[in-house]
Amino acid sequence: MQLTDAQRLDWLRLIRTEGVGPRTFRGLINRFGSAAAALDALPDLTRRTGKPTVPASKTLAEREMAAAARLGVRYLAMGEPDYPKSLHATDTAPPLIALRGEVGAILKPSVALVGSRNASSAGLAFTERLARGLSEAGLVVVSGLARGIDASAHRASLGGGTVAALAGGHDKIYPDNHRSLVEEILGAGGALVAEMPMGWVPRGRDFPRRNRIISGLSLGTVVIEAARRSGSLITARFALEQGREVFAVPGSPLDPRAEGTNDLIRQGATLVAEVEHVLAVIEPLISGGTVPGGGVNDRPEAEPLDYWDEIDLDGGDRRPAHGALCEEPPSLTALDASGPSEAGDAHARLLAALSPTPVGTDLLARATGLPVRVVQSLLMELELSGWIERHGSGSVSLRSRG
């Protein structure tokens, strides 16, 4: 897939619309066939919920693109050749990422290094050794441009190219004193990626959103020094949900900065004391040529992390494995082509298959004999009518009427 300039602008407008996040974006594109059609349909579709949505304006989207171009930033759409396959394979992949720097840096096999902002000297020294070793082994090091461990990882891996995921817009580097580090990264053939608009100053909840991009770009995430409430543990949690490897560097039980990493090791993370411990796990993944996937459905004990206030429209499975985004006007679906009695029968069959127990879209399609796309459309109508509620990993259940 390769978007035209007009389609890319429509994608930007849709993802910048209030209430539209990764999951809702996917549902709208898959239902209406294109971002342009989704933008046209969204006001009427949401009016029935009592909270009509006004799509982001074309003028604002054009201004954002112009500001991005002045900084050398370009937008990559999920499904395009330059969009990283590893990130595409995640449940909440950003529909558009803004890239500044060399695209090759985000397409190579990579490992994320994250950890404490208030790192110890020993932690920083080990980060440098690990990052340099991974870089020399041909891996790109991904991190979040934060103080401490992140900055140390970026600097030590400049020789092999490093990728920084931003919590804000490309023109709002955080922390501000890392602007020189940004120039070093770009000058060394690395890259910066962001999903937030130009001019966006990062807020607290934007950092966890960024963290799932760090882990999503990477085959595995290494945590070096993290307290029990550290944001680095959120990155590790995202990595688990995304079906990626999680590594942790052990530390002294007397150091609060090691509590989180020691907990990860007790919970099954791979202990890392040297670069070979990471390479022994990652290199077979690279030679196998497959992108790790899976995610929350493979780990039913984990409650998925969610950091978006999305319009809940589709109720369908958000995982990329269930079909690529469509950007061509679709032909009539089976539901559209059927008569009123057939549509009513499909509605009744779906209601009969639902219960208070959460179930995924694929299982509903098999149980009813309906195409997945028809099931998703019907679920959207049932959601708007208050009949069903959505749960983690895209499953749905009948809402209690009592």
Image: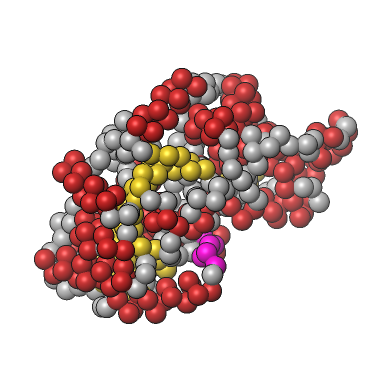
Specify the principal SS of the magenta part.
loop
282 relative to 36 in the view: left or right: left
At x 72%, y 43%, the residue is: 373
Residue 348 vs residue 378, the one in the foreground: 378
Residue 218 vs residue 372, the one in the foreground: 218
In the displayed structure, 121 sits above or below 168; it is below
Residue 304 at what x, y percent from top left? 47, 53
Q: Using the rendered view, name the quadrant where residue 279 is placed.
A: bottom left
At x 88%, y 32%, the residue is: 339
Q: What residue occupies the far left of the structure in this picture?
A: 121
Residue 313 at what x, y percent from top left? 60, 35
In the displayed structure, 162 sits above or below 101; it is below
At x 79%, y 35%, the residue is: 332
236 relative to 78 in the view: left or right: left
147 relative to 248 in the view: left or right: left
Residue 108 vs residue 336, the one in the foreground: 108
At x 52%, y 24%, the residue is: 55
Q: Can residue 265 be seen in this view?
A: no
Which image quadrant: the C terminus? Answer: top right
Q: Using the rendered view, name the quadrant where residue 225 is placed.
A: bottom left
Q: Can residue 341 be seen in this view?
A: yes
Residue 128 at what x, y percent from top left? 20, 67
Residue 232 vs residue 67, the one in the foreground: 67
Residue 127 at what x, y percent from top left? 22, 67
Magenta segment boundaries in residue numbering: 290-295
224 relative to 31 in the view: left or right: left
Residue 292 within the segment the image draws in magenta? yes
